[in-house]
């Protein structure tokens, strides 16, 4: 396993359309392993191959919720996926919220995405899977699939892209305002 270098906004590799994977070779499996390790190391919930400089249609996602305090993580709660050649087949509804990207470290912006997404992909075992995800998982699927077509979320941002410190400040401000409203 290895931690890979994550390309940052401005790197041309992030603007390219990726090629489908024809055969799942040991090299592809190694790449997926390294992508997971890199994603966990940097605290992301998704990573696409072009972000590590590989122009292939591969994404890894892990939106598994934290287990309740004192509880062991359960297999059935796992939202960890390696997707080869993912294709979004269906979308439903809308969600608007802050989004970030490991290729634009420390920044966030508001993006509208579908609330629910159905994606078809090849697993590492070569089988075809269909997955329907909601909320954060739907957002992650859309964000990562965009990377495979050379699209960064910054192209879809409503308003400005802000630093995560500024985002924390705004969340705190909104919370204080809400507390005040409740007092009145
Ligand atoms: Zn990203």
Image: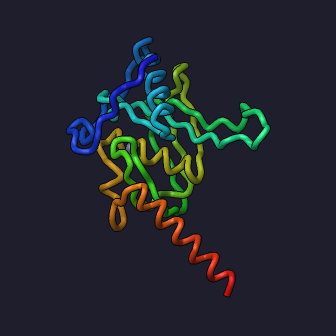
**Percent of width and height locating residue 109:** 39, 59
**Percent of width and height locating residue 29:** 46, 18
Which residue shows up at 48% across the image and 40% down it? 44
Which residue shows up at 54% across the image and 62% down it? 93
**In the displayed structure, would residue 160 be above or below residue 48?**
below
**In the displayed structure, would residue 45 be above or below residue 178?**
above
**In the displayed structure, would residue 184 be above or below residue 15?**
below
When asked about the image quadrant of residue 55, the answer is top left
Q: Nearer the viewer, residue 164 or 129?
A: 164
**Percent of width and height locating residue 42:** 45, 36
When asked about the image quadrant of residue 64, the answer is top right
Check the image and name the residue furthest to the top.
26
When asked about the image quadrant of residue 3, the answer is top left
Give the color scheme: rainbow, by chain, secondary structure or one colour: rainbow
Ligand 1, by image quadrant, is top left
Q: Nearer the viewer, residue 8 or 13?
A: 8
Quadrant where the image shows the C terminus: bottom right
Q: Nearer the viewer, residue 49 or 171?
A: 171
Which residue shows up at 57% across the image and 77% down it? 177
**In the displayed structure, would residue 2 be above or below residue 83?**
above
- 146 horizontally vs 135: left or right: left
Q: Nearer the viewer, residue 183 or 160?
A: 183
**Percent of width and height locating residue 134:** 59, 51
Which residue shows up at 29% across the image and 29% down it? 53
The total of numbered circles placed on residues is 0
């Amino acid at each position: 396993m290895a931690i890979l270098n994550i390309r940052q906004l401005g790197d041309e590799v992030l603007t390219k359309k990726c090629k489908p994977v024809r055969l799942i070779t040991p090299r592809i499996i190694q790449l997926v392993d390294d992508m997971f390790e890199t994603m966990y190391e940097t605290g992301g919930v998704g990573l696409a191959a072009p972000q590590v400089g590989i122009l292939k249609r591969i994404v890894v996602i892990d939106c598994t919720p934290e287990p309740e305090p004192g509880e062991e993580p359960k297999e059935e709660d796992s939202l960890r996926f390696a997707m080869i050649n993912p294709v979004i087949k269906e979308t439903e509804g809308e969600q608007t919220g802050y989004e970030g990207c490991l290729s634009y470290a420390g920044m966030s912006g508001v993006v509208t995405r579908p609330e629910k997404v159905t994606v078809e992909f090849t697993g590492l075992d070569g089988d075809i899977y269909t997955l329907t995800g909601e909320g954060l998982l739907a957002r992650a699927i859309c964000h990562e699939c965009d990377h495979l077509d050379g699209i960064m979320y910054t192209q879809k941002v409503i308003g400005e892209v802000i630093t995560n410190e500024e985002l924390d400040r705004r969340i705190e401000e909104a919370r204080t305002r809400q507390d005040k409203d409740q007092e009145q």
